[in-house]
Amino acid sequence: MLLAIDCGNTNTLFAVHDGTDWRAQWRTATHATRTADEHAVWLTQLMALQDLKLSDLSACIVSTVVPQSLFNLRNLARRYLNVEPLVIGDAHVDLGIGVDIERPQEAGADRLVNALGGRVAYDGALLIIDSGTATTFDVISADGVFKGGIIAPG
């Protein structure tokens, strides 16, 4: 099963996918200094309530807009799942969408994942609006290229 982690400025979402369905999801406040051990204890307890175990997990993907949290989230996957996590934004991770902005390396993981989700769900050009701690407005071209957008207060 896959552990998907979406770490935002305010909340971090952990979700388990079994290859067909989402089995469980949990949300916690984002604390960049929360250690891998703390994440593991919390996650182990919540998974047990759903009759799941850390040993059920064979893959992990991380998307974060909080760079300071990445070290501990990587270590959670390495130490407790015995896997190397796939991290959105790492140079070797190909999402299958183009990025056509002045500094592509600065495209936020959250915005790229939104673009990918939009492309999977819909054909054609898209305007994706994500309202969270910040509100983003992003344009995806008809051929699936992230063209950028704006960030506004949430």
Image (cartoon, helix red, strand yellow):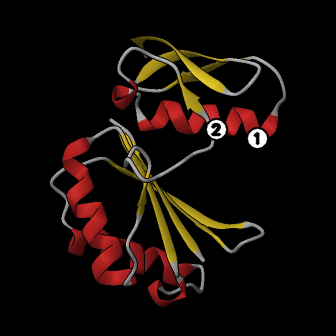
Secondary structure of the residue carrying tag 1 is helix
Instruction: Tell me if 20 is positioned left or right of 101 in this view.
Output: right
Q: Residues within 10 Å of mark 2 (few under 14, many from 20)?
A: many
**Which label number is shown at residue 120?**
1
Query: Is 150 situated left or right of 78 in this image?
Result: right
Quick one: which residue is furthest to the left in this view? 33
Name the kind of residue labelled 1 in the image.
Val
**Disc 2 to disc 1: CB gap under 8 Å:** yes
Q: Which residue is mark 2?
A: 116
Q: Residue 129, labelled with which disc?
A: none
Residue 128 quadrant: top right
Is 122 left, or right, of 6 in this rendering? right
Please give the count of numbered marks on the rendered protein. Answer: 2
Please name whichever residue, 98 or 69, is drawn nearer the observer in this view of the structure.
98
Location of residue 6 in the rendering, given as x and y in whole percent from the top left corner: 45, 49
Residue shown at 63%/24% (left/top)? Answer: 145
- Residue 74, given in percent of the width and then of the height, sits at 29, 65
94 displayed left or right of 8: right
Of residue 23 and residue 111, the one placed in the foreground of this image is 111
Quadrant placement of the N terminus: bottom right
> Height in image: 128 above or below 35?
above
Where residue 76 sits: x, y (%)?
A: 30, 72
Q: Is residue 54 visible?
A: yes
* Residue found at x 63% / y 43%: 96
Q: Residue at x 68, y 74 (%)?
A: 18
The residue type indicated by label 2 comes to Leu
The spot of residue 30 in percent (x, y) is: 30, 47
Examine the rendered structure and indicate whether residue 99 appears above or below residue 5. above
